[in-house]
Amino acid sequence: MELRLKSEKGFTLTETLVALNLGLLVVGFGFLLFLFVTRIAGSWQQKMMVRDAVDGIVNKISTDTERSSILRVSGDTLLVMERGAGRIFYCFESGSVRRNDFLLCSGEKVRIVSQIEELGNDVRIVATGTTGKYEYRRSIVLRANPDSKAIFLRAMEMR
């Protein structure tokens, strides 16, 4: 009696191990790509958060200046705009920004530091937003006219 092995269809152990290793490599590269993209997206999100906070505050100040007839600076943290019978106060303290008693930026996620200087009839504000890792700076020069039409010059500076 003669024993014969039948030809069985399937994969050998070596072929299975090679396929398993290639599959693990593909999954590993996919995971590394995911981590890389997630890190870049988080970095971009922080940059945009800082930029949006600074731009929003500077644009709000610009809009209020257009409607103001008198600009006054009190110290280096308070800007007062007068229009008609009303006043608008901008207070920059401890990384936060307040417009009258309304908090525009709390300083928790984005810290806003501003330098306010009087230049004759003009007021120069340099607003710098930081998250610790990223910094964005925007400068604006404001000039109020007695007829409530403000002329303002904008200069952007980014780091």
Image: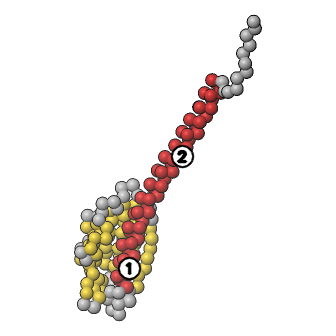
Name which of mark 1 and mark 2 comes first in the sequence: 2
Residue at mark 1 to residue at mark 2: CA–CA distance: 43 Å
Identify the mark at residue 62; answer none if there is no mark: 1
Q: Residues within 10 Å of mark 1 (few under 14, many from 20)?
A: many
Identify the mark at residue 33; answer none if there is no mark: 2
Residue at horizontal 44 percent and vertical 63 percent from the top: 48
Q: Mark 1 falls on what kind of element? A: helix
- Residue projecting furthest to the bottom: 147
Residue 51 position, x and y percent, is 42, 65
Task: Decide if residue 55 is on the left or right side of residue 84.
Answer: right
Residue at horizontal 36 percent and vertical 72 percent from the top: 57
Residue 61 position, x and y percent, is 35, 77
- The picture quadrant where one finds residue 102 is bottom left
**What quarter of the picture does the C terminus occupy?**
bottom left
Residue at horizontal 41 percent and vertical 82 percent from the top: 152
Compared with 150, 106 (above or below) is: above
Residue at horizontal 51 percent and vertical 47 percent from the top: 34
Residue type pointed to by label 1:
Ser
- The picture quadrant where one finds residue 20 is top right
**What quarter of the picture does the N terminus occupy?**
top right
Task: Decide if residue 16 is on the left or right side of residue 149.
Answer: right
Residue 86 visible somewhere in the drawing: yes
Pick whichever, 29 or 55, lies toward us. 29
Residue 69 position, x and y percent, is 32, 89
